[in-house]
Image (spheres, helix red, strand yellow):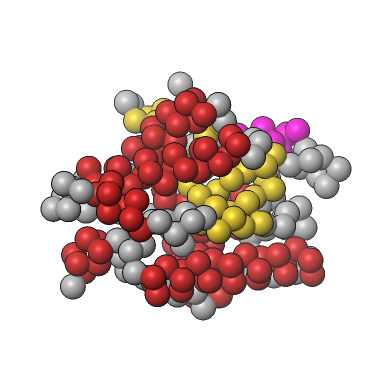
Amino acid sequence: MAGKIGNTRNYAKELEKILEEKDAGGTGRERKPDRLLLHSCCAPCSSYVLEYLREYFAITVFYYNPNITEDGEYRRRVEEQKRLIKEYNRQVEAQDFSGMHSTKMAHRIEIIDGDYEPGRFYQMAKGLENCKEGGERCLQCYEMRLRKTAQLAAGQGFDCFTTTLTISPLKNAQKLNETGERLGEEYGVLFLPSDFKKRDGYKRSIELSVKFGLYRQDYCGCVYSKRGKE
């Protein structure tokens, strides 16, 4: 299988191949780009992903994170996401990509502000409260957010979907991709493979967070991850 190293798939390589094929087919303005529904966990993590993919896709960010269980924290993060998208769209309108990796081929970005449903997270996490970070509770949280994304992508006719979560060194990219592909098959919409932390993606997200003055938190958003930082 392409992009496979030993028994482990190289999801970053698989995505590179998909984008190379898009380049070969032409990504000019005369060619209608595929519509990508991008689940985003926060503005800092999405910063590199949006910069990287906006030349190839017409991206709609889906901000759906019921794991963020404090209202003030949720509101702050979603507003930062909207602020970042507004800045990226300003660059497209002004054709000003100085200091950026994107070019004049970049497309505008839309956003769907998902329902804030912390109760769903608590229901999902019942019995898993004492799991270690990265354990079964986190895997179920991936499933919850990606399922909602797949449902929306299928329902609104998107060509594909994926998530920014693979940019984090603390998230299990293999499990995220396996979950995304399974849900993509279930709902009949393509899941775009990724491991966004590769190609210095995580490093670039930090640089972009500084560039745009983004609020960058040190925990995923749930009460259990926050407790682990205290």
Q: Give the extent of the magenta segment.
A: 18-25
Question: Outermost residue toward the bottom?
Answer: 213
**Magenta segment includes 144:** no
Residue drawn at the location 52% of the way across and 29% of the way down: 187
The image position of residue 86, as x and y in percent, is 66, 69
Residue 230 in the figure: left or right of residue 2: left
Identify whether 97 is placed above or below 109: below
Residue 122 seen anywhere in this rendered image of the structure: yes
**Magenta segment includes 24:** yes
Where is the N terminus found, in terms of image quarters?
top left
The image position of residue 99, as x and y in percent, is 64, 69
Residue 173 seen anywhere in this rendered image of the structure: no
The image position of residue 163, as x and y in percent, is 48, 47
Residue drawn at the location 58% of the way across and 39% of the way down: 153
Q: Quadrant of residue 228?
A: bottom left
Residue 112 in the figure: left or right of residue 184: right
Identify whether 42 is placed above or below 123: below
Between 193 and 159, the residue placed more toward the observer is: 159
Give the dominant element type of the magenta stretch: helix, strand or loop. helix
The image position of residue 109, as x and y in percent, is 67, 57
Identify whether 77 is placed above or below 182: below
Between 229 and 127, the residue placed more toward the observer is: 127
Residue drawn at the location 29% of the way across and 43% of the way down: 139
Question: Outermost residue toward the left?
Answer: 130
Residue drawn at the location 61% of the way across and 57% of the way down: 111
Where is the C terminus found, in terms of image quarters?
bottom left
